[in-house]
Structure formats: C-alpha cells, structure tokens
Image (spheres, grey):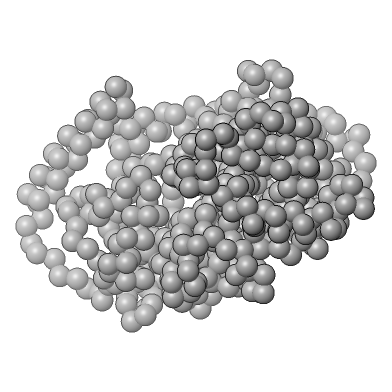
Amino acid sequence: MEHLTLIAIFMTLISLTTIAYLFHHHKPSTPATNLPPSPPKLPIIGHLHLISDMPHKSLARLSDQYGPILYLKLGHVPTIVISSARIAQLILKTHDHVFCNRPHLVSAHYLSFNCSDVTFSPYGPYWRQARKICVTELLSPKRVNSFQLIRNEEVTRLIQTVSTRCGLEVDVSELFFRLANDVLCRVAFGKRFFREDAGDDLVRILSETQALFAGFCLGDFYPDWEWVNSVSGSKRRMLKNLKELSEVCDNIINDHIMKKGQLGTNSSEDFVDVLLRVQQQDDLEVPITDDNLKALVLDMFVAGTDTTSATLEWAMTELVRHPKVVEKAQTEIKSIAEIKGEVEESDLHNFNYLKAVIKETMRLRTAVPLLVPRESMQKCTIEGYDIPQKTRVLINTYAIGRDPNSWENPLVYDPERFVENEADFRGQDFRFLPFGGGRRGCPGYSFGLATIELTLARLLYHFDWKLPNGVGPDDVNLDEIFGLATRKKTALILVPNRR
C-alpha cells in the first residue's frame, strides 16, 4: 500500500512538472545532431514508458524494430542502446577511450562511498590506480590460486549438504546463493556470510546492500531532481544502509588491524588485509582512504556473489533440461577424476566440454544482460550517427547473445558450438561478453569462473540430478527476475542421487 502511495505522489508531481514544462517551453526544438533511430517519446518521461520490468527484453524488441543502435531519452538522460557484436566492438575497442566513463548512479553514490570502487568510479587517475590494485593485488592469478583452499572447503560443504538430502527435493537456488556469498565473504572479509546466528549483522546488512544495488532507481533517470530520491524513499533507505555498512566495515577493519601481527605469508591474506597493506605504500598516486578501502572490498563482494550464483543456477537449469548434455559432461569428468575419486582444481583445465557448457549458459542465459552503463566523455560518431557528450550507453548482451547474425540457431541450448570455438571470457570476441570488454571489463572473471567450474564439476561427478516427480524438461519455469544479476523467478528444485 505504501508503495502505491509513493507511486501516486510521484505521478502527481510528474504531471504538475509536465504542465510547467510545457508552459515554459513553447518553442519547437530542432535536433542539432544526426542521432540514431528513435521511437516517439513523451514529455518528461521520454521513452521510460517503453521499458518493462525486464529492460533487456524491452530494449531487444525495440532494437528489432529500429536497428542495432538505438537512441532513447530515459527520463532526462540521453541514452544509446547497442544490440549487435559489430557495434559493441566499436564502443568497447575502437572508441573505448571515449566510452570508458561511468554515469553517476544513485546507488553507487551512496553505497560505493561516493563512487570510489572500481565498477562505478569515474574514469581518471583514481580509477586507474584502483583497477591496478585489483588486477595486481586482489585478483592476480597468484592471488586467485591462493583462495583455492576456501573454494575447496566451501564446495565440499555444499557436497556434504546435498549428500544428506539424496532422494529428496532440494532448493539448489538457495544452496548456490549461500555458496557464492560464503566464498566471497571469506575471501573479502575473512568470515563466512551465513552463520548459525540468523541475526548476524553482516548477513542482514550485505543482503540489504545487494537488494539496493539491484533495485530500479528513478533518480538515475532524473539526475537534476534530487527530490525524486526523497519521495521514492530510496535515499532514506540507502543512507540507513550506508551508515550500517560503515559501522560493520569499521569493525572488520579494526579486527584485521588488531590481528595483523598474527599474519603469516601473503597467501593467507583476505581482501581487507591486502588493501590495508597497500594503503600504507608510499608510491600511491592517489591516497587510499578508509572509505575507498570499504568501497573496493564491497565492490569485489557485490560484483561476484549474484553473478556466480545466477550462472550456477542457470547452468543446472539447462543441464536438467538436456540429459544428453549432462551425460557427455559427466563422462568427461569421470574419465579424468575417477582415479583420484574427487575433482580437484588442477583438473579443471582438462574439462573442455564443461567449459563449453558454462559458455553456452552465459550466452543464452547471461547473468548480466545489460552491462554496467557507460557514458561518453566527448562527442563521437558511430555508424554515421552523432553521439553527444555525456550520453549513457547500454550494451545489451542478452540481444547480442541471441543475434541470428552472430549465432546459428541462437535460441537453442547447444554447448557444441563452443567446443571448437575459441571464444574466451576476456571480451575479445564481441559476440560473447559475459564479463564485458574494453578497459572497463570485469577484472574478476578468473576468480568467478574458478568457483563455477569447481562447483559444477563436483555436483556432476558425485550426483545424478533429476526433476521432481511430474515435472518434465519442458515444464521447468524459465521466467526471470531482473536485478543485480538476472535470476530465475522461481527457485530451481531438483532431486539428487548418489552416482
């Protein structure tokens, strides 16, 4: 009821503002630039009325009608939408220097400590330094490998949990969510996310942070109207979460400082330990404040949890719908792991078909169907169209992954297409961008993949998976819910049996 009241208030204010706008702006405007194709728009809201709660699908339909580069006015924000690999390459490679900035988003402003993380910070000296720290210190191959023990322990816990439920229906969506959060929380903060105490502050606060990042914020489309955030209630909710985040992060940092003298080698460091050490270096181009440290750690956590669990969820969803794919994947895993009786991380590079399964899942059921928005830093020409400075850019990987110009039978789940295909995860094949591309591409892809590959390999090695009685492959609900990552709308329920 409160939600409906807020919407009514907002629409009333929009109506009054529209009247004032039309009263004071009688003169017809003529476009000063050759913009990309665009559907008709309304005053004040622009094209917002054309966007559903599944924005990647709405934008894909509009691109089918108007072309692979589309101009929209979302509220007050000029926006272009890219829906083809060819034009994505122009944005992410040819003109990457123009489109490597981030727009100022409300949730990032409050929850990333004034956009001081890697994902949302504006392009410049601080971002370059922060990314360098992430690539060389937090997410280097050596560091990712050092977290092998944590991954192994948490996936082993998952296998043990599933073992106690053989023959019973299991909510694997919940298990994947817990696994991803536990791994990331131990790596980032040195403690498990889900604990015996259901009231644990870290659990509650980080869950709220994830929800706020996933939410639809009207203020992002009306950056000059501060009152929108107050009327919608989002500002109050974010400020409350920011205060709680600061307090819990301060406690975690203080605990790490107190225990600093007990640390052994760098391999035992979590992200907070690493950043506390880097913070003391004398050669930093931009000093790292405590708020910057909090933003960087939270960025690693938030960026990695939902995407990892959603990818695992969609992979298992497609596997149980395609028994022949499962059989081939299990045969490959068994041939390599059976001698030792367990799948180890050192085996993962041999699982070529399993990697193809993961790639095909990321193509057809991409966890991030719209890459994090970019913003043009200067005027640019793309495909003969003028893109003004400070235009927001949305790259629709959902549409690109289903483009018949790039993929044969794009709506068919077929891992075979990646068996001989050299497409990798690093953003060099612009038909396949699960982790983005260009200089703003996700630096944590190898960390996330290590957890996904190990989890799937062990689940397929130890168990056969069936749908509940009365549920066939075509009955599985594939509806989505859009958020920080695009997840199944209904939980995936499966029945495991020991192999």
Q: Residue at x 53, y 71 (%)?
A: 430
Q: Which of 24 and 78 lies nearest the eye of the viewer?
A: 78
Q: Quadrant of residue 243?
A: top right
Does residue 11 lie above or below 55 as drawn? Answer: above
Q: Picture coordinates of residue 235 (x, y %)?
A: 40, 33
Q: Is residue 441 visible?
A: no
Q: Residue at x 82, y 43 (%)?
A: 152
Q: Picture coordinates of residue 271 (x, y %)?
A: 74, 44
Q: Is residue 403 visible?
A: yes
Q: Picture coordinates of residue 201 (x, y %)?
A: 63, 23
Viewport quadrant of the N terminus: top left
Q: Picture coordinates of residue 150 (x, y %)?
A: 81, 41
Q: Residue at x 37, y 55 (%)?
A: 57
Q: How many marks?
A: 0
Q: Quadrant of residue 497?
A: top right
Q: Which of 270 and 450 lies nearest the eye of the viewer?
A: 450
Does residue 455 lie above or below 85 as drawn? Answer: above
Q: Residue at x 64, y 19 (%)?
A: 198
Residue reaching furthest to the bottom? 384
Does residue 397 lie above or below 486 as drawn? Answer: below
213 on left or right of 13: right
Residue reaching furthest to the front? 470
Does residue 136 lie above or below 168 as drawn? Answer: below
Viewport quadrant of the C terminus: top right
230 on left or right of 487: left
339 on left or right of 216: right
